[in-house]
Image (tube, coloured by chain):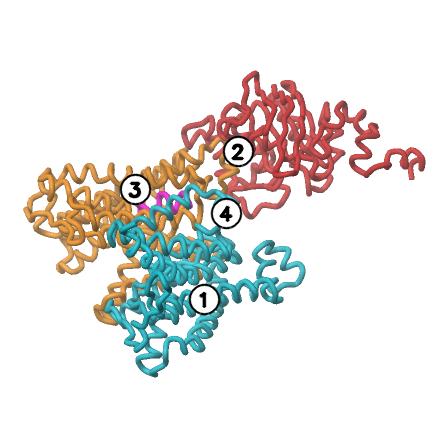
Amino acid sequence: MRTLAGIALFGLVMLPLPALLASQVWLNFLVMTLFFALLGIAWNVVGGYGGQFSFGHAAFFGTGAYCAAVLQAQLGLAAWLGFALAPVAGGAVAGVVGFLSFRYGLRGSYFALVTLAFAEVLRILANSAGFTGGGSGLLIKLAPGAANLQFADRSGFYYLVLALVIAGLLLSLWIERSRFGSYLVAVRENEDAARALGVDAFAIKLRAIVLSGAIAGVAGAVYAQMFLYVDPGLAFGPTMSVEALLVPIVGGMGTVFGPVLGSLALHLLSEAGRSVLGQAPGLNLALYGVLLVIMVLFLPDGLVGLLRRVRRRFLRGRADA
Amino acid sequence: MSQLPIVVPSVLNGLTTGAIYALVALGLTLIYGVLHIINFAHGSLLMLAMFGVFFLHKLAGLDPYLALLVVPPACFVAGYALQRGVIARASHGKDHNILLVTLGIAIAIENVAIYFWRSDTRTLDLSYAFDTVNLGVALVALPRVVAFAGALVVAGGLWLFMARTDLGRAIRAVAKERQGARVVGIDVEHVFAMSFAIGTACVGVAACLLMPTFYVTPQVGHSFVLIAFTVVVLGGMGSFPGALAGGLIIGVTESLCGLFLGESLGQIGIFAIFIAILLLRPSGLLGHRA
Amino acid sequence: MLEARGVSKSFGGLKAVVGVNMEVPAGSIRAVVGPNGAGKTTLFALISGFLTPDSGRIRFVGDDITGQKPERICARGLVRTFQITQPFAGLTVRENVAVGAHLRHESRASALRHAQAIAARVGLGDRLDQPADQLTVAARKRLELARALATDPKLLLLDEVMAGLNPTEVQEIVAIVRRIRDDLGVTVLLIEHVMQAVMSLAEHVLVLNQGTAIAEGTPAAIAADPRVVEAYLGHGAASRMTGAGDA
């Protein structure tokens, strides 16, 4: 109940923000923070709850982004259609990757490697295929209007992404409260013990990665609509894969609010870095790399874990007083 | 038969490139064999070493082959420090934490390099870069022949080291049975760090042998590391002869794929092999379970 | 309830289980004993689907289950515990047991309720919210039992649930296991080294040595069997013991 109330509170706080924020810069910041939270929520399903560390979530994200872009730019179909099909495409690619990896028993490092390799293969394919526009990418025609899922003003995207993030939070909550989630966590903690208790570990992991890929696909479609441009490096490059895993790791893996908290912390930090060190290529990611090392060294359970410990200490302190 | 004149040089080029892959993969496989982790930072360490060789030449006029006296030892020290100072502290009892830390190190190193050196391509200007050796069937660039020979020498030396020295035996003991090695008094933490250091030194040697014919950019590690992973998986995780043979096979495959399929699809050949081996080759993959 | 015929398994050149026949009638408590390395745990892994036999058949309530996956076998009502306890370390006791309970309880609330009842039955009622990795050895063994029991099995395979416990704790577990059979009608097959427990619990004992069944019968008959004594204490031990009286 408390988590549900938390999600409601999150919605209530976030909803009026576009009207209250005078600056487009901050609104933009929030849109990107929510967008990466969505991507992090996707990774969190299979990585956080399921313990299967994907290093190639760009494969699913990029598939969603290209799905939206190709349907509009090459086939002239409606934006909403691309948007609706993006999770199907992302989920399907994830299903193939998951089926192969889990069927052959890949875990840990091997699973990380194989996901990374799939993302690279898709990047090379997108680079050489014709319908993806090759290396120069695809432009979606500018045609503002809610029907085209293009918004003249940033707040349109804000509400779109906010709605998706809230849906993602509710989904995470459902995972925590369902048989599926209980099985998924059991497989993460000890696969053999889970199987001995009747859990079909293969089916559970496969369902988790398909779900995760579908959400990442939606995030990809959002990205394509926001920037009206997709190219192989943006869609399938390592940056998105790293963002996807870093967000929940910083926030707290396998928790409902971890990805939101992680995304906020990460992007506040990167804004701060930019204002101190100036805008320069590489800086952002260098910061992320260092942060990843620091988080694993000192806060392996993320910000949510830190908050929980602080609260416990506080409660104990009060009980003592 | 008409294709022979282009196929033979292509195979020879593939073998020389493959020797470098083998060298990078030797380091990776040593680290994997002992620590049971895949070192995602391996490629970025190679990139750093290559920049080291580049600047030693540009700023101090040091020949890349003379840099063999400087760069590998520096890599050795850096590898030791990295393992002891960062990676060993990260696990908290879970292997996936180490995986994440090496990924973090890789991202950090690579992007700091982009920050300082941008994505420009840098090459060395050496008088002997275009000298060739006549091997009878074809002409091969001298630096490539040196690289091939160098890689074989290092692989042989490493094998002797593992077979004949106390440290080599300790490394093998730890790779086989960590707890047992601890019980008989081997300083396991030290062995971990030494393995990591030697693995990184291999990358230093590869950098010196590569720079006369290759370019360096902050992203150069990528292409090598994924191929090195492929080599390691192909040859069997932790196996030295496997890494050597795997490197040569992949080098030739890549060269021939590039010849017949074109540059960008040629890369797919490597990944296809990589994924297929990961999925289908059960020994060494499934043998390692938690 | 359970019937194994000619079950064999080898690893490379090592014959772990050789042509074992066994039967576990419904409602019984039976035990498998034998020295270390006799193939007991391998036999359990074969029955529960974690390993596939090289030859032989295993039948459970009339159906052939040979080579089926562990999760399928568990769904049929045959569940095992692990000799080395395998808790879901990051979860609480309640959540651990609920994973088992979910097999027959789709909804979270009903699985948690069932988990609570089962935990109380094995004496973990006051530790429901404790993380599993903070439990004592004795409590971990009980958790292992509780998780398996929560799947509402027909047959429970217990792999050394009493190893490493002190005599009081052993007596408590013995009482719990007996009540599981008496109250819930669950058939029990156990591997045990603690002879005191085997003697007081099991109605029938099968002795394995080097992968082969060397004797079976009531606990008293087994204890007196010279082949069994030799298996445990080495060749010639039985004659030495009778020769030297009770020294």
**Residue type at numbered disc 3:** Gly
Front in this rendered view, residue B18 or C185: B18
Secondary structure of the residue carrying tag 2 is helix
Separation of marks 1 and 4 at Cα, in angstroms: 23 Å
Q: Colour of chain A?
A: orange
Q: Magenta stretch: dominant SS? A: helix
Q: Which mark is residue A196?
A: 2
Front in this rendered view, residue B115 or B265: B265
Same subunit under labels 2 and 1? no
Front in this rendered view, residue B7 or C211: B7
Q: Colour of chain B?
A: cyan
Q: Which mark is residue B202?
A: 1
Q: Is residue C215 magenta?
A: no
Counting from the top left corner in percent of width and height, residue A37 is at 28, 50
Which chain does the numbered disc 2 sit on? A
Chain letter, red: C
